[in-house]
Structure formats: C-alpha cells, structure tokens
Image (cartoon, rainbow, N blue to C red):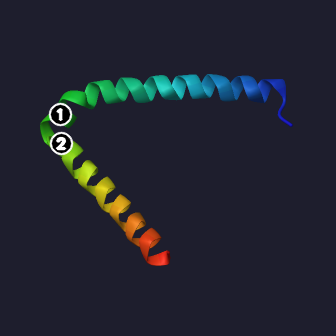
Amino acid sequence: MFSTGQLIFAGLFLVCFVFIIIKAYGKDRPLHKKNYKGIQWIIAYFMIFILFLFLVKYFMKN
C-alpha cells in the first residue's frame, strides 16, 4: 500500500515530531505547574460527573 520511502519518511517524521513535542512540553512544564495548580481535582470531578451520568442512564434504562 505504501512504498518503502513513504514508510521511512512517516517513521522519521513520527520520531522527530514526538521528540519536538516532548522538548516543548519540558520547556513549558514550570509554567504549567505555576498556572494550572489544582487542575487534577477539576479533572477528577469531571470524570466522576461523567460516570454519574452513565450510571443514571444505565439504571433508568433497566
């Protein structure tokens, strides 16, 4: 389906892209820690709310 050259290009692109994303996140990490304190609680409450909605749907269906 893909030629050897296309697969090599896709592999190299993926490796470079992941490397650049990790490097950029590493630079921004101190800024994220400063600006987004407590975000894990918001995510946890959001996930609990979604779970609650699924439970309500399940019990209303049965």
Q: Residue at x 75, y 27 (%)?
A: 7
Residue 59 on image: x %, y %: 43, 71
- Distance, label 1 to label 2, CA atoms, is 6 Å
Question: Could you tell whether 35 is left or right of 40 in the image?
Answer: left
Q: Quadrant of the N terminus?
A: top right
Label 1 amino acid?
Answer: Lys
Q: Is residue 58 above or below residue 51?
A: below
Q: Is residue 35 left or right of residue 46?
A: left
Whether pointer 1 and pointer 2 mark residues with C-beta atoms closer than 8 Å, the reply is: yes
Q: Nearer the viewer, residue 8 or 44?
A: 44
Badge 1 local density, few (<14 within 10 Å), some, or many (20+)? Answer: few
Looking at the rendered structure, the secondary structure element under dot 1 is helix
Q: Residue furthest front?
A: 62
* The quadrant where residue 57 appears: bottom left
Residue indicated by mark 1: 33
Question: Image point 27% across, 50% down: which residue?
Answer: 43
As rendered, which of 52 and 28 lies closer to the eye? 52
Q: Amino acid at mark 2?
A: Tyr
Q: Residue at x 68, y 29 (%)?
A: 10
Where 55 falls versus 46 (above or below)? below
In the rendered image, residue 38, in percent from the top left (x then y), is placed at 15, 43
Check disc 2: other Cα within 10 Å, few if <14, some if 14-19, many if 20+: few
Identify the disc placed on residue 36.
Answer: 2
